Amino acid sequence: MKIATHKKKTMEKLGVEAEDIHEWIDGLFDQKRFNEFCLKGALGDFNPYEHRKHRHCKEAIEEAVEIFKDKYSEDIIRKVFESHVREDYFGYYPSRKDFEKEEFWNKYHIY
């Protein structure tokens, strides 16, 4: 999902866009590059699946709270983070262990 779409949904739900949180979660990732990665298996040295493994999971929320605590309340950070990840995984909230499972890869990352 595009950051603009995440921002819009976050504004509707929470009254803030939190673009910086969404950008942190997605990092250098964007849907076009990820789709290209899935089709080709690589994008030079950049592996968006590795990025997702570290930022699109339950375990990354504590890092997000630490990074954005001076700008947003912990409650908002947690809600933005969880909402973003669930939106990307059709309601599911993955852990890092999920990224090691072939079933997870096939369900969420093969287009």
Image (cartoon, rainbow, N blue to C red):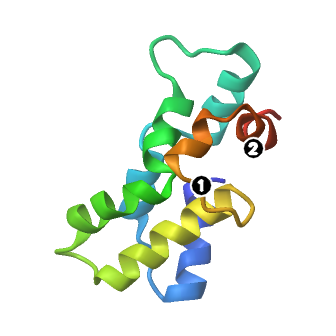
Q: Quadrant of residue 36?
A: top right
Residue occupying image coordinates x 66% and y 64%: 87
Q: Is 105 situated left or right of 61 in this image? A: right
Q: Secondary structure at mark 2?
A: helix
Label 1 crowd (10 A; few <14 / some 14-19 / many >=20) = some
Alpha carbons under labels 1 and 2: distance apart: 11 Å
Vertical order, 58 against 38 (above or below): below
Q: Residue furthest left?
A: 70
Vertical order, 55 against 32 (above or below): below
**What amino acid does circle 1 point to?**
Pro
Is there CB contact under 8 Å for labels 1 and 2? yes
Q: Position of residue 59 (x, y in %)?
A: 41, 56
The residue pinned by badge 2 equals 108
Q: Is 18 situated left or right of 68 in this image? A: right
Q: Is 49 situated left or right of 28 in this image? A: right
Residue occupying image coordinates x 80% and y 42%: 107
Q: Is 40 situated left or right of 53 in this image? A: right
Dividing the image into 4 quarters, which one contains the C terminus? top right
The residue pinned by badge 1 equals 94
Q: Position of residue 96 (x, y in %)?
A: 50, 45
Q: Earlier in the sequence, mark 1 or mark 2?
A: 1
Q: Secondary structure at mark 1?
A: loop
Q: Residue furthest top?
A: 44
Q: Quadrant of residue 62?
A: bottom left
**What amino acid does circle 2 point to?**
Tyr
